[in-house]
Image (cartoon, coloured by chain):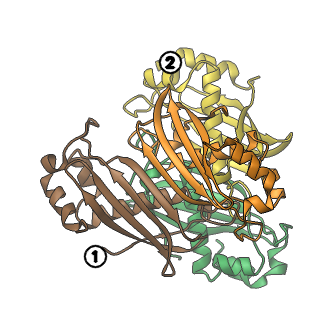
Chain colours: A yellow, B green, C brown, D orange
């Protein structure tokens, strides 16, 4: 189990209603995903050097509670699924042990020319590492 | 059929990959939704005055193409479904007549004390107006 | 006199105090500056094609009033000064004919390799055009 | 001497040029300022409870270097000046011990009804604390 990524809500992330604007949660997903990759040994610099990127092809978020300035969001990232060409990531965001947002994102893999590639073929080591984190 | 809302991509909405950061599309959905409500006679000021808000309870987006600085995004908004307590909105975002992103959002209705309310009961006129735009 | 650039305040640009977060005004400056260059015939695409960029080396802003969601900001851009290597731009932002923010930015010129260049030398036509808008 | 506040540059804070968009530095100033107040015992919650806010009346920033995704910005905050009704704050932002940005902000003090107040009168303890950090 990977440690949660912590994001502290900034003032400019709140809106007129006094709560964190929902569009920011998509950014928190990205922060947590990059942190997850770093923790498993695939920091952004390494991926860039290996000429690999994983663009977002879909995101979905369900909101259960609101948060506001200075709240600490604990984001738990997990690999829901992995195929040669697709990565499916899950996120559970909690504040004070209560679920705030549950989200998912799907990604493909592209090379440095933005051409879709099979991760299994171009980077079998990362593929195996991610697979080892995938849910049964 | 409501006219599309147009959002011109700003420089600060692009990222290091040279494309519009995907988190911004959630903001475009909100812009288009507010514009839609305004066009059907329920601008933000009126809703606020009537003590009504419609918080987002979920969003989902599928990305088909990327966009970049100065692209013009045409966003078509439609009411997918409406019940007394839930609004379901659909968005099709196009650039140069090609689909960029297809998205949905779900909303509940709350009063000025953030208490969930039945739109049908507290604001039957808006309920009927939205219903008249709902897909068959 | 160039027409003002109009920016309508978005919901996500407001913060918990119910007003437009001050950091956004730096973005409005950029929007207005790009719009100004476009109106005088130097749209972003053309500048990029000519291998020229004008990075920001300083910005300063004074706030006189606040704004909030759905306010229309009229931004008047002017060339305060121009030398071979520096551009100095001024901005007056108004809402309902009252001054909201007065700002300035300074820029250098760089080529496509991010090397500082003399605008007068590499692009005398743009230099002359900008100079014709400079204050006496 | 107060410890620097650290901000790690996020992917969505970069732009199409591959660098941190300059508008974000105004947000980093706010993060660092709030952190500074917290470290000297005046966290946001306490200030809000005491019915005090300190709106920004001006900001100015000079950029010396660029930063990019995953860079760690060390932000040193200091009190440049303090009067009964004005606070003047300075910021030095460094990355790898090289200065990236030098900035300043000015603030007034308002009560919970947004009326300007004398900090010295309404909150002499905070006034003395801030004064003790002010440069000679």
Q: Is residue B17 above or below residue C133?
A: above
- From the viewer's perspective, tell me whether residue C12 is left or right of residue C111: right
Q: Chain of mark 1?
A: C
Q: Secondary structure at mark 1?
A: loop
What residue does disc 2 label? A123
x and y, in percent, of residue A60 in the image: 66, 47
Q: Nearer the viewer, residue B57 or C20?
A: C20
Q: Nearer the viewer, residue B43 or B136?
A: B43
Q: Quadrant of residue B36?
A: bottom right
Give the position of the C terminus of chain A as an image quadrant. Answer: top right
Q: Is residue D24 visible?
A: yes
Q: Is residue A68 visible?
A: no
x and y, in percent, of residue D77 in the image: 61, 40
Q: Is residue A41 above or below residue D111?
A: above
- Closer to the observer: label 2 or label 1? 1
Query: In the rendering, which numbered label is found on residue C1?
Result: 1
């Amino acid at each position: 189990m990977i440690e949660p990524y912590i994001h502290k809500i900034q003032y400019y992330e709140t809106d007129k209603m006094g709560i964190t604007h929902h569009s920011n949660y998509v950014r928190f997903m990205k922060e947590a995903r990059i942190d997850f990759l770093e923790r498993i040994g695939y920091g952004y610099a390494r991926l860039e050097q290996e000429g690999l990127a994983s663009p977002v092809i879909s995101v979905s978020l369900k909101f259960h509670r609101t948060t506001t300035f200075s709240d600490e969001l604990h984001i738990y990232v997990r690999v829901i699924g992995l195929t040669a060409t697709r990565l499916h990531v899950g996120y559970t965001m909690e504040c004070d042990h209560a679920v705030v947002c549950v989200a998912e994102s799907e990604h493909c893999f592209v090379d440095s020319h933005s051409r879709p590639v099979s991760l299994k073929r171009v980077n079998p080591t990362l593929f195996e590492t991610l697979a080892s984190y995938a849910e049964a």
